[in-house]
Amino acid sequence: MLHRYPKRVALIMLVLTALVAAFPLWGEAVFGNQANFMLEKLTLMLILALFAMSLDLLVGIVGLVSLGHALFFGLGAYTLALASPDFSPASMWWMLPLVMGVSACVGLVIGILVIRTKGIFFIMTTLAFGQMLYYFISTSQFAGGTDGVFIMFRPSLALGERTLVDLDNPYSFFYFCLGMLLLGYFFLRWLTRSYFGQVLDGIHDNEHRMQALGYATSGYKLVAFVIAGVMAAIAGMLAAMQYGFANPAQLGWHTSGEVLMMLILGGMGTIFGPILGAFAYEILLYVYEHATTHWPILMGLTIIVAVLVLPRGIAGLIIAPPWQRKPQAASKTLSEREKAAVALSAQPVTPRKEN
């Protein structure tokens, strides 16, 4: 799997990142009174993009399709909600490691059990674990049942008595989420280009061959499963910080389905594709919800068209535009014809017998 893309990919992503980062400068001029709402929507897109990238590590890089990935998303939200004090803000310096530690431990336990399965069995096993936690949280009084748990104060990011980032400020929280997304992106870029990432690529392409070469593929998949779970939990924590509560819906299988659709729209296995998919999905969702009450039908048709027309997602259009694929296909056909001609000319000619 290729993780080195044309320069235009970096250029386009850099322009889009700068455009998003500069939203506080141009948002009010474009959206007017709706600027604050759009800022919240844009912050949600950043959080969902981090969530989608974590799933892409499993689905696109390793080749493990999970329908229970929302388990970690909701786990991060509930860890923050249940560990936060009622009358004072928690410190981000210990809350973030707590969320990462809890999700890593849960991911390790679940991963040891599910990594042994493959294909449809892996899908159903992860779905079962996700639904088990969903029903457990929904029926537990300590977790607020179906109402969830409210978060009175967002965690504080301070050094002594000096506040480094005021997370209660919408703009500061927006840039904090943007920073977490960029940190996750560069981490996955480094991971996929490392030796560990090359092994994951080999597992995705042919796991049996990797096992024959002496690689303990189960261990590599387990580590990837834990890393993806930790990243999803961080995204869930950010989502709980934004909305001020943790709800069982964040654990449901439909949340895993939605983030999987983001991968389909953006392009799996590309790292930057899930970011584009998360933004595209939320924009389409906003447009369809305001267009008709039957917006799920429109969203379903959009996903079907995306699968048929854009099998590699939006990222595929950037990596290999259609106007660049045709010459390659033609040259490939010409090369195959040349090889056939050479092979034909190399065959010995049997002289005809004259009568």
Image (cartoon, rainbow, N blue to C red):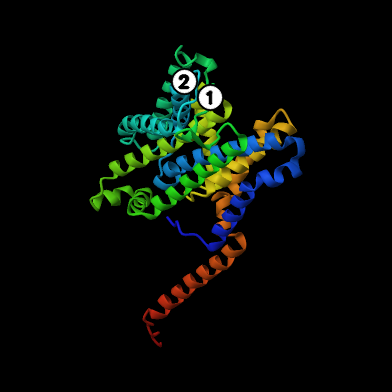
Separation (CA) of disc 2 from disc 1: 8 Å
Expressed as whole percent of the image width and height from the top left, the position of residue 249 reads 53, 24
Q: Mark 2 near mark 1, Cβ–Cβ under 8 Å? A: yes
Expressed as whole percent of the image width and height from the top left, the position of residue 170 reads 61, 35
Q: Could you say which is closer to the camera, residue 350 or residue 339?
A: 339
In the rendered image, which quarter is residue 317 located in? bottom right
Q: Could you say which is closer to the camera, residue 43 or residue 352?
A: 43
Q: Quadrant of the C terminus?
A: bottom left
Residue 87 shows up from this direction: yes
Give the residue type at disc 2. Answer: Pro
Q: Could you say which is closer to the camera, residue 319 or residue 180?
A: 180
Give the answer, above or below, for where 222 lies relative to 185: above
Residue beneath the point at 38% across and 40% down: 227
Residue 301 shows up from this direction: no
Specify which label sits upstream in the sequence, 2 or 1: 2
Expressed as whole percent of the image width and height from the top left, the position of residue 231 reads 44, 38
Furthest toward the top, the residue is: 141
Residue beneath the point at 52% across and 72% down: 334
Give the residue type at disc 1. Answer: Phe
| 330 relative to 208 in the view: left or right | right
Give the answer, above or below, for where 215 lies relative to 106: below
Q: For the residue labelled by badge 1, is the local secondary structure a helix, a strand or a loop?
A: loop
Residue beneath the point at 33% across and 41% down: 223
Furthest toward the bottom, the residue is: 354
Furthest toward the left, the residue is: 214
Residue 80's tag is: none
Residue 85's tag is: 2
Expressed as whole percent of the image width and height from the top left, the position of residue 213 reads 24, 53
Residue beneath the point at 53% across and 43% down: 263
Residue 153's tag is: 1
